[in-house]
Image: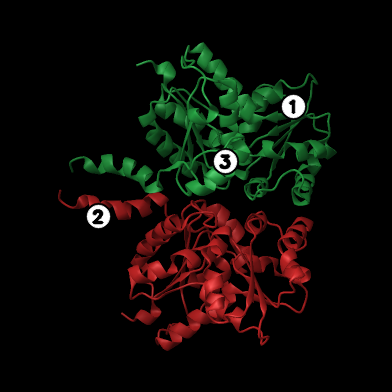
Chain colours: A green, B red
Amino acid sequence: MDARNNPILVIDSGLGGLTVVRALLNRLPGERIIYFGDTARLPYGTKTPETIQHYIHQIVQWGLRHQPKHVVLACNTASALALPVMRGRFSPIPITGVVEPGARAAAGATNIPEPVIGVIATEATIRSGAYARAIHGRRHRAKLILTSTPLLVPMIEEGRSSDDPLVQLALKQYLKSMIDHKIDVLVLGCTHYPLLKKAIRTVVGPQVSIIDSAYQCAEDVAARLSRANLWASLRSGDDRNRFLAYVTDDPDRFAKLAPRFLGFVVDSPLRVAPEVLYQQEIRPAMCQPA
Amino acid sequence: MDARNNPILVIDSGLGGLTVVRALLNRLPGERIIYFGDTARLPYGTKTPETIQHYIHQIVQWGLRHQPKHVVLACNTASALALPVMRGRFSPIPITGVVEPGARAAAGATNIPEPVIGVIATEATIRSGAYARAIHGRRHRAKLILTSTPLLVPMIEEGRSSDDPLVQLALKQYLKSMIDHKIDVLVLGCTHYPLLKKAIRTVVGPQVSIIDSAYQCAEDVAARLSRANLWASLRSGDDRNRFLAYVTDDPDRFAKLAPRFLGFVVDSPLRVAPEVLYQQEIRPAMCQPA
């Protein structure tokens, strides 16, 4: 058994993590990706830390059957709220997220001594303070503007793109304070947002560095696999054949929306009903003798 | 034990059902309401019939401990996708929804022989065909225009109201085809939407009958309780004291947003974690001897 050829497990609340998959497939052409989208319980962005930690714990536990060599929490909300706890519980399996790589890139994106850095993300990600901590840990003199932008995900999932006047108006409203304060860097703190990059660029202007946390996450995974000597020894294959997806609800909706994020067509994913995730935690406790 | 003084159980995916609670409290001043908002798994509007039926089954099962004399599925998506199945499973407990009363009111709102009736609702409600069946069953010559409007719920939950330009632009986009076809009646097929009634009225004009399914649902419950001789014999009380809420996640967020829907301030609701709902269905099956 060569652990190097084990897959990377990518966990997300739904579809957004597929932008991370795309970046991983590009950056790591020999790796296999198992994707888990928790579509029966999405979105995570309005839920509590306890609930999100519980959901992610169930999914990592379920995912152990695939013997992942690395686990990626591809959802910013899950990274912000569940990553340290999961690392403790599932050690020594390496688990990484999207917040740290994004924050590192934001901190390094400019030489200005007191840069103004904007972050857009879900309610729960902003409230967690994870980006503020991660950026200030590296650039303590940065001025941060954090804005939750809860309509962008449903707009993207409805099929809207940068050309839609409603998307443009929403971005103008959400980014107004950042433009007034002349931000130098803007972190896209949700894996859906790169799909609206063109409209975001138009609103913030050409001088702002836009940080895509999906791309940064893939760079981070590549560096870690390299340090651990865990690059796959397989030949590189067709993207579609290196990708296997599971969802908790509605495989057809997933298959319909996924190509926009991935850049290639996928078969309907396999379904893992939420009750399967609950059964695996309830069963062992109940099988113990009284 | 006088069943007349048992509570009405109102089930919703989150907060929208509180517009039904408000209508019930106004219409039935002696009744007590137990509300269950499934905030850990909302929204239902993008999920499959099987998943929604499973969630609603768990909640009705859980709610039996309160011995409800009547159960209301206050969520249009749940009414559209789970009502007939739940009636069969939990008979003889009366279970009603919001789709039938709304469709009945729409069918009766005009004397025009071939009225044009618009319905706005979630993706899942529209896809279910429940409104189309219910309206055509009464007015088979009605011309229907059905449009899913997935951004309206997150806009309302973000705190936006009729005065917001983004809300107005979204409504203009969503209702364009209905205006072009000169609708006579518009059904608000989601319990959140009455909160945007002012902006909807502005877009569709004064000649259109707007049907609020929450109000129609309360009228329907009142008529059924009356026929079954199940009106409460209690004196009427303060709205706040006749209302008790449970949620599956984040009681504080619920308490913060609820007053907009209810018209009065509430205490933080009690929390019923999703695992409690799964345990009640897994335990009995597992306690049987092998």
Q: In this view, does B289 lie above or below A211?
A: below
The answer to whether residue A98 shows anywhere in this view is no
Residue A258, label in figure: 3
Q: Residue at x 67, y 21 (%)?
A: A138
Residue A142, label in figure: 1
The answer to whether residue B190 shows anywhere in this view is yes
User: Residue A152 appears at what percent x and percent y?
Assistant: 67, 46
Q: Check the image and name the residue furthest to the left.
A: B289
> Dot 3, crowdedness within 10 Å: few (<14), some or many (≥20)?
many
User: Residue B175 appears at what percent x and percent y?
Assistant: 72, 65
Residue B284, label in figure: 2
> Image quadrant for the C terminus of chain A?
top left
User: Residue B34 appears at what percent x and percent y?
Assistant: 45, 68
Q: How far apart, in angstroms, are the residues tagged by discs 3 and 2? A: 39 Å
- Describe the element under mark 2 as helix, strand or loop: helix
- Three-letter code for the amino acid on which mark 1 is drawn: Ala
Q: How far apart, in angstroms, are the residues tagged by discs 2 and 1? A: 56 Å
Question: Could you tell which of marks 1 and 3 lies nearer the N-terminus?
Answer: 1
Q: How far apart, in angstroms, are the residues tagged by discs 1 and 3? A: 36 Å
Q: Residue at x 78, y 50 (%)?
A: A165
Nearest the eye: B217 or B161: B217
Q: Is residue B83 above or below residue B37?
A: below
